[in-house]
Image (cartoon, coloured by chain):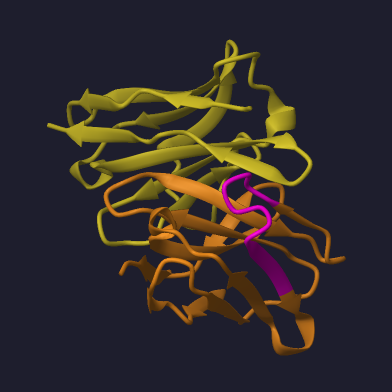
Amino acid sequence: EVQLVESGGGLVQPGGSLRLSCTASEFTFSPHWMNWVRQAPGKGLVWVSHIRNDGTTTYADSVKGRFTISRDNAKNTLSLQMNSLREEDTGIYFCVTENFGFQYWGQGALVTVSS
Amino acid sequence: QTVVTQEPSFSVSPGGTVTITCGLTSGSVSTSHFSGWFQQTPGQAPRTLISNTNIRSSGVPDRFSGSILGNKAALTITGAQTDDESYYYCVLTPGGGIWVFGGGTKLTVL
């Protein structure tokens, strides 16, 4: 069974940085396109970023220039480097596989941006 | 900017049928938008029900089906069960690696 485990969440002050990781197992990671999706407390799902197997990336306008998505196929790991964090970035961040649409979801990592 | 619309809430009786839709404020949804549907209960990660318009994920009961109805993507639950009471989200892509979620639909089964 596909497993995706996010880590790296926590409490950070506005303007700070945090790096999330998503470790994949029980499937072949390298060919898969991957995404980050977030959910603010009590709110809906919001797409954040996408990376293809060749490293091509896209970002939501709200995080463009502040967040960087990357992958290490040798380590089966997806990452999200988050800089210049704002209070509105608070939420649970999910990594998600993509194959003509979203498939498998991790359990999520909680990021809290607060002073 | 792409904006995806969903009904905020729906109510269905046990055993009944309900169709939740996913539209665009500008234009029609087609199979080229690769629409998907997800179920989420509070405190849990989303679960993929449907991808690529009508492909049911492994383990998803066949009472869940996806389609294009008119100019919208649609999720139909036939023979609703109390366990289906949940939030449902749709997503679609306008292309270029970008995805946009709808605001979610709260389904009540009673």
From the viewer's perspective, is residue B9 above or below residue B63? above
Quadrant hosting residue B82: top left
Instruction: Name, please, the residue furthest toward the top.
Output: B70
Quadrant hosting residue B73: top right
Quadrant where the N terminus of chain B is found in the figure: top right
From the viewer's perspective, is residue B64 above or below residue A49? above
Residue at 32% in and 67% down: A114
Q: In the depicted view, which residue is nearer to us: B65 or B36?
A: B36
Instruction: Name, please, the residue furthest toward the left.
Output: B110
* Residue B31 placement (x, y as % from top left): 70, 28
From the viewer's perspective, is residue B97 above or below residue A104? above
Residue at 49% in and 64% down: A85
Q: Which chain is orange?
A: A
Q: In the depicted view, which residue is nearer to us: A87 or B90?
A: A87
Q: Is residue A93 magenta?
A: no
Q: How many marks?
A: 0
Q: In the depicted view, which residue is nearer to us: B87 or A36?
A: A36
> Chain B is shown in which shade?
yellow
Quadrant hosting residue B88: top left
Quadrant where the C terminus of chain B is found in the figure: top left
- Can residue A1 be seen from the camera position used here? no
Residue at 57% in and 79% down: A21
- Can residue B43 be seen from the camera position used here? yes
Which segment did they paint magenta? A59-70
* Residue B49 placement (x, y as % from top left): 48, 47
Horizontal relation, residue A53 to residue B44: left or right: right
* Residue B33 placement (x, y as % from top left): 69, 31
Residue at 73% in and 75% down: A71
Horizontal relation, residue B20 to residue B99: left or right: left
Instruction: Name, please, the residue furthest toward the bottom.
Output: A75
Q: Is residue A60 magenta?
A: yes
